[in-house]
Amino acid sequence: MGLDSDSPVHSVWKSDLYRMQLKAPVPVPVINQEVPNDTPAYLGRDYHGDISHIEANNLLSSQPNGSYLVRNSRSANGEFHTLSLKFNDKVHHYKLFYDSNAGLYVREKRYDCVRSLVADGLVTMYLELKVPHTLERLPTANYQESPYMTINKRKLRALSKHLR
């Protein structure tokens, strides 16, 4: 049952931004065929153990954008790992922290798994690259005047009229 074009249901607020998010690269883990003995329980097959910055770059250079791996950080003394991620044809390296009560994180937001963290990061990086002007205006946008706040009421009204 679809709604026709004269339906009072409005499209999702900032649908152009949503469409841009869908164009972002997707996470592609670089799988380690030999699982290191020191693999933490919270990391998966994308963990490569003691490889260097240069080795990570070499592994990721021939991979598509969105590819990533996790490795030990040689300077961290076990405090954190390094997330190496390819985006916009460049390899980026981030400190990857783990809190047993809250999960994995690079900044303040916590994640259950590396793949979710990378997916969110790729969308953010993609939007910052492609539509920085839109992101700059979001904090000043008036959400209460957007149809997003009332979409459920309008949809319910439209559907109830349609079913009568």
Image: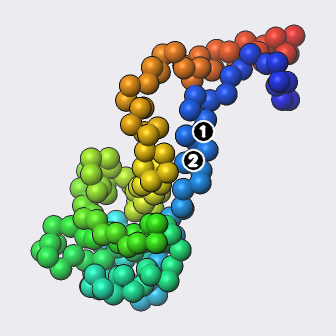
Local secondary structure at mark 2: helix
Q: Report whether residue 21 is seen.
A: yes
Q: Nearer the viewer, residue 124 or 159?
A: 124
Q: Residue at x 44, y 53 (%)?
A: 129
Camera-side residue: 132 or 69?
132
- Of 14 and 159, the residue lying toward us: 14
Residue at (59% x, 54% y) in the render:
23
Name the residue at 82% across, 11% down.
161
Where residue 31 sits: x, y (%)? 47, 80
Left or right: 153 with respect to 121?
Answer: right
Q: How many other residues sit within 10 Å of disc 2, few (<14), some (14-19) or many (≥20)?
A: some
Please identify the quarter of the rendering in which residue 136 is found.
top left
Q: Position of residue 63 (x, y in %)?
A: 51, 79
Give x and y (percent) for residue 56. 35, 82
Relative vertical location of residue 141 with respect to residue 126 in this rendering, above or below: above
Residue 37 visible within the image:
no
Residue 54, relative to residue 89: is it above or below? Answer: below
Quote the CA–CA distance across marks 2 and 1: 6 Å
Vertical side of 162 occupied by 20: above or below: below
Q: Which residue is mark 2?
A: 20
Is there a contact, CB below 8 Å, between mark 2 and mark 1? yes
Look at the numbered disc 1 and give the secondary structure of its residue. Answer: helix
Name the amino acid, label 2: Met
Screen quadrant of the C terminus: top right
Q: Which quadrant is the N terminus positioned in? A: top right
Q: Which quadrant of the view contains residue 152?
A: top right
| Left or right of 79 in this view: 124 | right
On screen, residue 76 versus residue 146, left or right, reads left
Name which residue lies at 44% across and 66% down: 87
Mark 1 surroundings: few (<14), some (14-19) or many (≥20) residues within 10 A: few
For mark 1, what is the residue?
16
